[in-house]
Image (cartoon, rainbow, N blue to C red):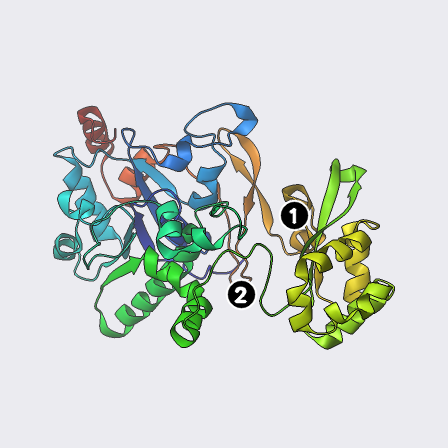
Amino acid sequence: MGRMALEGIKVVDFSWVFAGPLITAYLADYGAEVIKVESHSRLDLTRVSSPYKDGITGVNRSGGFPVANSSKYGITLNLKHPQASEIIKRLITWADIVVENFGTGAMERLGLGYQELKKVNPQIIMLSATIQGQTGPRSTFTGYGWNTVALTGIGNLTGWPDRSPVGTLQAYPDSVVPWFGVVAILAALDHRRLTGKGQYIDISQYETTSHILGPLLLDYTTNNRTATRAGNQCPYAAPHGVYRCQGDDRYKSDDRWLAITVFDETEWKAFCLVVGSPVWTKDKKFASLEARKKNEEELNRLVEQWTVKYTPEEAMALMQQAGVPAGVVKTNKEMFEDPQLEHRGYFQRVEHPEIGQCYQQAWPVLLSESQAKIRPAPMLGEHNEYVSTKILGLSDREFVDYLGAGVFE
């Protein structure tokens, strides 16, 4: 393997949970040298969240922490210790980038705001990813990605019209914010390369997540329509849903599912041929998209009478061969065993110091000349000595003194 894309970039990572750490994990996997700063007294929530390897709890055994912290060095610092500032100063002098996602004002209270860091390293690039940004009437509100799901209205859009909102399976903003963060950092690095100047990056999770709701916001501003929960329905397609199919002993499931979407009359005619052109396909109730939308509940029942005769793979093949969009609704087991993902090396095997051999999700980006290289996430405080002596240049004696004083808590 040749030189990695971000080799030589140095990052101090104060962030936790997912929105911030995923930014720095991306940088680390593509070659940046990332030092994650943690604390025994305030553990990253993903270190103490299930699932755990073999069901055994422990700060180094969570399945969540490695996802967002691969390829990083890990140190533990008591940021409130009087001598911690000496280590922090060395870190900031060394770094190109600092990333954090605490509540607005938290870094300033620790003496680590951008204006203070800039005094130590005028070229530093600092990124803060907070719920609603650093300015504005609600900038001081704190929370997590789940709060942003509610703020943006995504929670209100998820579910069925006749039921309460169900929200999303995960804190969805945590999957959106990192991509904006990575691009912003790369842009700031290029700006510094051209001008010699660092800068401050202020990311609002509220705004980055609202970005994906663009069509709904435009629909309101243009047509005065308020989006509501619609289950699996789509205003521009029918049938459009997830339909029950035969189970499969391989997956120990009685029911499996297939997603089908029919947008236009060409796809509808093809769909009718696939299901055998039964009498109901010729009914006026289904003669146009408008008619199918009006009778969608009945249409869905009729579609499922056909899909239950097949496994989802069989039904998908028949639909796709006819040009009808359709896809198997996969389980996590099926995803892990997917030959396409295996071919592209999406799940990479790493050796973790405590939990042993495990798999790490790679990034959905393949660079022909500088592929990502994934190392296991650090154990808590694993690299205290290495970072102090090999990267920051402390003598062994200095490190021991700091350690004894409780700086590396």
Q: In this rendering, is residue 362 above or below 279? A: above
Nearer to the camera, 50 or 190? 50
| Quadrant (top left, top right, bottom left, bottom right) of the C terminus | top left
Give the label, 1 or 2, closer to the camera.
1
Determine which of the numbered discs, if any, sits on residue 335 in the image.
1
Tell me the tag on residue 27.
none
Image position, residue 199 (x, y; %): 22, 64
Q: Position of residue 393 (x, y in %)?
A: 24, 43
Query: Disc 1 residue type?
Result: Met
State the CA–CA distance, disc 1 to disc 2. 27 Å
Vertical arrangement, residue 91 with respect to residue 268, above or below: above
Kindly indicate the quadrant of the structure image that contains residue 186. bottom left
The answer to whether one can see residue 28 in this image is: no
Position of residue 101 relative to residue 317, above or below, is above
Image location of residue 35, percent across then percent down: 33, 45
Q: Quadrant of residue 321?
A: bottom right
Q: Quadrant of residue 318?
A: bottom right
Residue placed most toward the observer, 127 or 141: 141
* Quadrant (top left/top right/bottom left/bottom right) for the N terminus: bottom right
Residue in the picture at 32% in, 52% down: 11
Q: Percent x, y for residue 397?
A: 21, 30
Q: What numbered label is drawn on residue 369?
A: 2
Q: Secondary structure at mark 1?
A: helix
